[in-house]
Image (spheres, coloured by chain):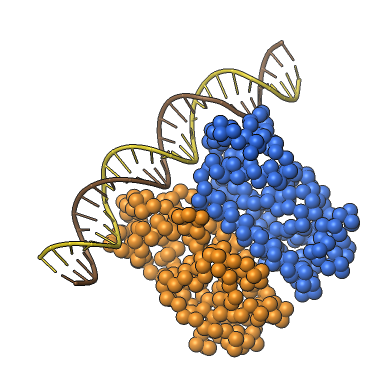
Chain colours: A blue, B orange, C yellow, D brown
Amino acid sequence: MEELIRETYRGIFEEELIDEIISVAKIVEFKEGDVLIDIGKYIKTMPLLISGAIKIMREDFDTGELLLYFIEKGDTCSMTLTCCMGDKKSEIRAVAENEGLVAMIPVGKMEEWMGKYKSWRAFVFESYNNRFNEMLAAIDNIAFMHMDERLYKYLLEKSKINNSRIITKTHQEIAYELNSSRVVISRLLKALENEGKIKMNRNNIALLL
Amino acid sequence: MEELIRETYRGIFEEELIDEIISVAKIVEFKEGDVLIDIGKYIKTMPLLISGAIKIMREDFDTGELLLYFIEKGDTCSMTLTCCMGDKKSEIRAVAENEGLVAMIPVGKMEEWMGKYKSWRAFVFESYNNRFNEMLAAIDNIAFMHMDERLYKYLLEKSKINNSRIITKTHQEIAYELNSSRVVISRLLKALENEGKIKMNRNNIALLL
DNA sequence: CACAGACGGTAACAATTGTTACAGACTTAG
DNA sequence: CTAAGTCTGTAACAATTGTTACCGTCTGTG
């Protein structure tokens, strides 16, 4: 376990910082579907992702839901960062996309490290930067792309995140994440199949190109 | 001028930091329509907004454009922050919404102050937080709202930013900022007028409620 | 005044997306 | 095996948004 953390953050953090992380972090295991952070909740510890993938979702006032982006190994969620630092409610929901591990860091340490370790500051800013760009990408998707393009891009991302060309999702689940409806997704998937880009099976979709 | 800066940032920064800002900042005047930052450009100085308002836009690969949010007095653009720190190209465009003043701070000072002033760190994080929330609001708009709602909200925001119930914009300009087309905007404005929410005139729109 | 150009109104139509409804295939529990 | 529930396919229709086209009105310039 300790070795896993060292491996994940070697080259990113100084040795001493990694030692500190190991000594204060509480390792938490999660499995697919676990809700790690929910909208409206206060966050008191910051998660560093060691393995697995987490999807960040935004929810509408009544019914809608929308996938914003994914977080992978060696990353953190800067939305959570701002929550921690500012003592604010979370504006997003974080759901495990597959099983994995996070190291939970107390907020106090975070602030301490900001002054103490240059690599930590760099990491935090890099993280902010990544998140901004992913938010912008999310905006580009919904503002400038049609549903068929968004759907195909979504399948490609899912495939990449789960490291498999088989995407095990129902049409309904996909509809939720893209904030669309099941019938629309079925329709567009059929079109993608006709174009030869995917092959549909029950409960899963195979990416062909 | 010096007094204006003191006034703007009193209560946000320590006295010594304000002194430093005054001694290193280059004050730049801008007028409506000035492009302060453009997509793909590198930023070497960070702008602190003293007066006026700036709109932050995102552009599509070919034709589309979309207004993300506004920045007002006493604020900064954290997109620019990440650009400065990471030496990356800007992903957004900043255009003056009306005339105003910015204090340009060299990047080096920024980093120096991060270690030196607690109030500066708090400001930077607060700024990140604000920008995240505005990005989320932008996403909510385009993902969950229809064009008529977006349009009305847009008019309310414009009114607030310019401190006037008269919005001096052509339908075409509004269409650009909402990434729609002139005909659609005209149609929806007409509907808003029929509902008694606005009154249309040539080259301007009056908000009634 | 004449004219060009910007601005807005409107109609007609296309494309995209959403909604409702229903049916068949499959899976699982009992 | 039966029944219930899940998953997908499909049709028909509505709503929203985008596109094209054309026509007035207004404004500023020469």
Residue closest to the eye, A103 or A152: A152
Vertical comparison of A160 with A188: above or below: below
Vertical comparison of A142 with A129: above or below: above
Residue A146 on image: x %, y %: 51, 44
Residue B63 on image: x %, y %: 45, 55
Residue at image location 82% in from the left, 57% down from the top: A8
Q: Is residue B143 visible?
A: no
Q: Is residue B183 visible?
A: yes
Location of residue B130 (image quadrant): bottom right
Q: How many marks?
A: 0
State which quarter of the image contains the C terminus of chain A: top right
Location of residue A125 (image quadrant): bottom right
Vertical comparison of A200 with B30: above or below: above
Horizontally, residue D25 falls left or right of residue A34, namely left
Residue B65 on image: x %, y %: 47, 58
Residue closest to the eye, C18 or B66: B66
Residue closest to the eye, B58 or A174: B58
Residue B22 on image: x %, y %: 58, 87
Residue at image location 51% in from the left, 51% down from the top: A143
Residue at image location 64% in from the left, 51% down from the top: A69
Residue at image location 45% in from the left, 77% down from the top: B30
Vertical comparison of D12 with D16: above or below: above
